[in-house]
Image (cartoon, rainbow, N blue to C red):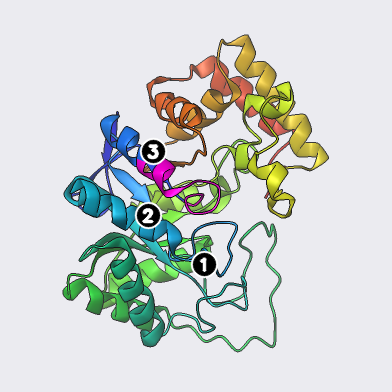
Amino acid sequence: MKYTKLPNTELEVSKICLGTMTWGKQNTEAEGHEQMDYALEEGVNFFDTAELYAIPKEQETQGRTEEIIGNWFTKTGNRNKVILASKIAGPSKFNEHFIREEGFTKAAFEDAIHGSLKRLQTDYIDLYQLHWPDRATNFFGKRDYEHDSNEEWEDNIQEILQILEGFIKQGKIRYIGLSNDVPWSVMRYLEESKYNGLPKISTVQNPYNLLNRTYEIGLSEISIRENVGLLPYSPLGFGRLTDKFIENEGIEDARLTLFPEMARYNGERSLRATKQYYDLAKNNGLSLATLALAFVNQQPFVTSNIIGATKMHQLKENIDSIHVELSDEVLSEINKIHDTIPNPAP
């Protein structure tokens, strides 16, 4: 395994992060425990979850993923071996859920953090992230920003950081990050931190893969210049960037088959680009998944690549991608495809 510093901290995290959102929905508790056992044995010490999980979200399974992780901590005693990340859900008007209506108020943070700590059976969360903004903006597959002149949101970023600072002082969370966010608010958080002595964000967790490189348009420069790492999710595009769909093998229980409402990656341009990446991978003796993950692993603005699997053979392949270094020639071919079909899946 390879390791790096979680930005603005002293924590050493694995370059592969174990994603957990299928546990409690597509995966049983026993399967989740098996994945954590294997990942830790392979040197993965960074796990990511959220109060919203399991996904696809349902009231009956909300919080179940954190419970599965908490039960594993208690069973194995491995809490001190894991850098643990979780998230507070944003306001429901921007992404319907079954937790609470309001955005990032003091009461919402109290409810979310204490609920997560109880389910996770731990006293602290290492990295606490805001799952999505509490204002209308272009996230979750929206390519362009359209301003609502009637919006009621007022800039509350300083207040959010002050609230989070309180929980840091209490020892309940250690560091903070954003998720599904955009350049404007990343810079606003950094501005408040710099000029008001408030906690600095460590990371941004956004989608990033061969079919969606929009992070490079504005956020990658911020990552590098301001030392705020990307935690890319969906590096395989919900499984689209794997061999199974092109080879038509084992797709009956794939996420894109079971949950077509999540299919951001099924457009004609995405399918055309995927086939070209598949051919490139095969011409270089790689699986498409390995090519896709190795590409993400090598980006200088990436802190840790969040992989997720429903089957153990997938998990093993995903973790093994850390040992693959793509040549300059292969990277050049990837960029040629990207130049021809840029960002087909926002």
Residue 329, percent from left and from top: 55, 15
Residue type at mark 2?
Answer: Ile
| Mark sitting on residue 132 | 1
Residue type at mark 1?
Answer: Trp
Q: Is residue 281 visible?
A: yes
Left or right of 256, for residue 37: left
Callout 2: SS: helix
Residue type at mark 3?
Answer: Gln
| Mark sitting on residue 168 | none
| Magenta residue span | 21-33
Q: Estimate the spatial distance between the alpha carbons at disc 3 and disc 1, rounded to whole Å.
A: 27 Å
The residue positioned 38% from the left and 42% from the top of the image is 17
Q: Estimate the spatial distance between the alpha carbons at disc 2 and disc 1, rounded to whole Å.
A: 23 Å
Q: Which of labels 3 and 1 is toward the front?
A: 3
| Mark sitting on residue 68 | 2
Q: Are the two marked residues, 2 and 1, in contact with CB atoms closer than 8 angstroms?
A: no
Residue 272, percent from left and from top: 78, 30
Query: Which comes sooner in the sequence, label 2 or label 1?
Result: 2
Query: Which comes sooner in the sequence, label 2 or label 3?
Result: 3
Query: Which comes sooner in the sequence, label 3 or label 1?
Result: 3
Residue 193, percent from left and from top: 30, 71
| Mark sitting on residue 35 | 3
